[in-house]
Image (cartoon, grey):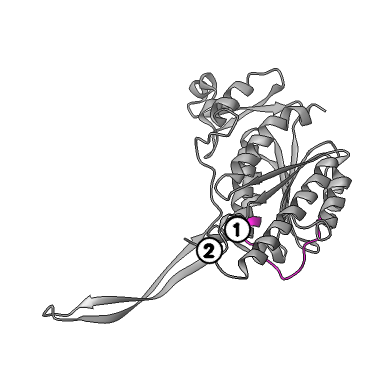
Amino acid sequence: MPTQLGESTLGKLYLKQLGTYGLCWWVRAIDDHVNFTVEPVRLEKNINLPGGQNSGNHSRNFLHNTGFDLLDLRDYQLGDSLRSIDWKATARRGKQVIRRFEREHRLEIVVLIDCGISSRIHCQGLDRLHHYINISSKFTEFAAMQGDKVACIAYAQQALGRAPMSGGIGAVKKVRHLLSRLSATNETANPLNAALEVKQLLKHRGLVIFLTEIEQPEAASQLIQAGQLLGTKHQVLIATLEDPETSKALANKAQQWLDPYRQFAALEYQRGKEMTRMQLRRNGVAIAVGSAKHLDQQVMAYYQKKRDIIGSA
């Protein structure tokens, strides 16, 4: 499994080679200079969301609603949906032409990625930051397919990088370019500073998604303040990964004299996180908690559920 973004090489490989007479094995080193590039994961073509319907069917039906107006016709480009092709215009021009629709209430979305020291924690095969990157990559592509605008901000103490608010395939490219350059820092993240940037960026009611770790109430005070600041106007979702090691520590039977103390510490840790969740929910902030395999689906399902309500407000 690739664990770092960017260009890399396999380097020197060691293998065993059977001797000429088949009597013994010899160690042989091979220098492999083949370069490859690791990029954020892409959205699957047919993704089924929990509690929702297939995204392709949703998009097709949604385009026929009165909430969309025909904007113009333009030449087909790689990545455009085949359902948007205007076959009559295609026949007249002799090349593929698509219809572009403009949504009356286009939703604006900001994805905030925690690049602080807690994002270095290893979780289910990757560190947390790279799980956040994969979720952001899938979600922004999915939202752009629905016709909404997307921006992305990576932050620690201050903003580390931005993909400006835009829509369509251009938004996907800008976000993926930002994601491919991210790395975890040694700073403690400050979500309040990121929230202040969002407040300046979003002029109308929008959707704000934090990809971060929920900590104890004392450590999460800035996250709670950020939720209070944005929750009065915007719809805020905090998406966080489950900690399987903590659940495993609580489920295991004590075998060593230190195990009961470890279980007590894990129990207090979970209790503190639950208190943080309660404070965030009281301020109108939604919480999504899931495994690395399913958290992206939860985020997209929440977006699908809320997009029309937020966009028409």
Residue under numbered circle 1: 130
Mark 2: which amino acid? Thr
- Between the residue at mark 2 and the residue at mark 1, the CA separation in whole angstroms equals 8 Å
Question: In the rendering, which numbered label is found on residue 10?
Answer: none
- Locate residue 146, reporting x and y percent: 64, 33
Secondary-structure class at tag 1: helix
Residue under numbered circle 2: 3
- Relative height, residue 158 to residue 172 (above, below): below
Decide if residue 59 is on the left or right side of residue 307: left
- Locate residue 19, reporting x and y percent: 17, 80
Residue 307 versus residue 22: which sits nearer the camera? 22
Disc 1 packing (10 Å; few <14; some 14–19; many ≥20): many
Which range of residues does the magenta coloring cover?
Answer: 177-191
- Relative height, residue 76 to residue 226 (above, below): above
- Do we see residue 141 in this rendering? yes
Mark 1: which amino acid? His
Discs 2, 1 touching: Cβ within 8 Å: yes
- Locate residue 18, reporting x and y percent: 19, 77
Q: What residue is at 50 percent from the left and 35 percent from the top?
A: 46
- Relative height, residue 106 to residue 184 (above, below): above
Q: What residue is at 88 percent from the left and 39 percent from the top?
A: 232
